[in-house]
Image (spheres, grey):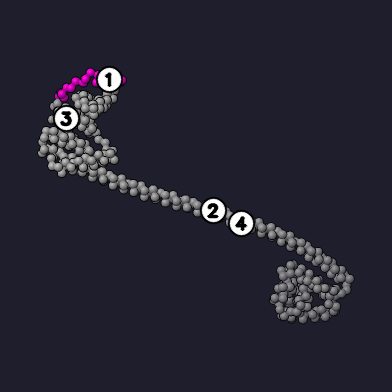
Amino acid sequence: MHPNGMLRLAQWLLLLSVILSQAGCQPSTIGIPPPGGDTALAEVPLPIGERLEPDDADQPEQLTEAYWAAARRCLGQGRHSTALAYAKLAWEATPRCSEEQTLLLAEAFMRNDSLERAERLALSLTMRGTEVTRYQAYRLLMWMASTQADQRYTRLYSDSAIHCLETIYRQTMQERERMLMETERLRHRTSMYIWVGFSLLLVLLTCLVAALTIHRTRITAARRQLRYEQERQASQQSQITLLRKQLLSRIDLMKRLDEERRADRRITLSADDWADLELVLDEAYDGFSTRLRNSYPQLTEKEVRFCMLVRLGLTNHELTNVYSISEASMKQRLFDYKARLGLTDPAVSLRRFLTTF
């Protein structure tokens, strides 16, 4: 074999050991029946004490696995004939052998110089097995060809083994790329989940802050409403007290007016009396004096006060006691004030107008 080819093969073998150690490739199980037409594999008797006797003879699967394990152990120890015997027993008891078991039997045949049978088994794996199994089969075939000093088949099998290594490397790289892509997708998905979770958390915090703000606003509004109610009640209480004082003052004024009317003498009203009287009329008749001043700004304060007494319901005689004039003069004054207000309808008197004003 050419030195460059041997160097290339050595490089690929080193690369495969790294790939297999990283990828953890396991042989797959395929249906490879025992070699047809080989009615009797060369009987190799087991040495004394090598026969396995399981605890439960009714479990042939355990016995078969024990035979395969014993064959693998004996090959590792260099006991090739014993390994072949165990491998044959296991092969005959296994209806569908795996690729690893087929390779084990082929290697046992090769170690016992049964190269034809080993080659037949190895060639069957090159057509049916996985890339890893095919590589191992081609390597086994290459060893057998080199043992027979067949350079042509040695080069052919080494090239096939290298091709399998290239395929394994390419598949491993593709698998690695796929795993990287899957890792990237998982990372992207994880990032998306984190972002969504963070967004939901932010929304929840925003809703919580908004709820707290609304709650505080409602509490503040309730406190303001309570304070307003308290102030309003206090104001109402003050107004009630003031109205009570005014009412007592009005009652006193009315009593005094009534007593003076009965005495049939002049009634004298002070400035405070006029102020109380105006307050009574405004509250009783919806701001009478204020509306009268606004509607007829040409009236003097004396004329407004006269209209207030008329609206209060004083008779002409009672008005004469207030102003110390005769009743005829009072009637003339009523007529003059009617004209002062611009009332031209003869059917409407001043007293009637002020009563409905």
Between marks 4 and 3 in the image, the one whose residue lies nearer the viewer? 3
* Residue indicated by mark 4: 220
The spot of residue 331 in percent (x, y) is 80, 79
Label drawn at residue 211? 2
The spot of residue 327 in percent (x, y) is 84, 78
Between marks 2 and 3 in the image, the one whose residue lies nearer the viewer? 3
Please report contact status of discs 3 and 1: CB closer than 8 Å, yes or no: no
* Residue indicated by mark 1: 53
Identify the residue at horizontal 16%, vertical 39% (top origin). Answer: 158
The spot of residue 274 in percent (x, y) is 79, 72
| Amino acid marked by disc 2 | Ala
Question: Can the viewer see residue 129?
Answer: no
The magenta stretch spans which residues? 39-55
Q: Residue furthest front?
A: 3
Please report contact status of discs 1 and 4: CB closer than 8 Å, yes or no: no
* Residue indicated by mark 3: 110
In the foreground, 304 or 65: 65
The spot of residue 289 in percent (x, y) is 73, 73
Please check the rendered image and state whether residue 48 is part of the magenta-colored stretch, yes or no.
yes
Q: Residue furthest top?
A: 48
- Work out how far the residue at label 4 is from the one at label 2, CA to CA, in angstroms: 14 Å
Prevailing secondary structure of the magenta residues? loop
| Amino acid marked by disc 1 | Glu
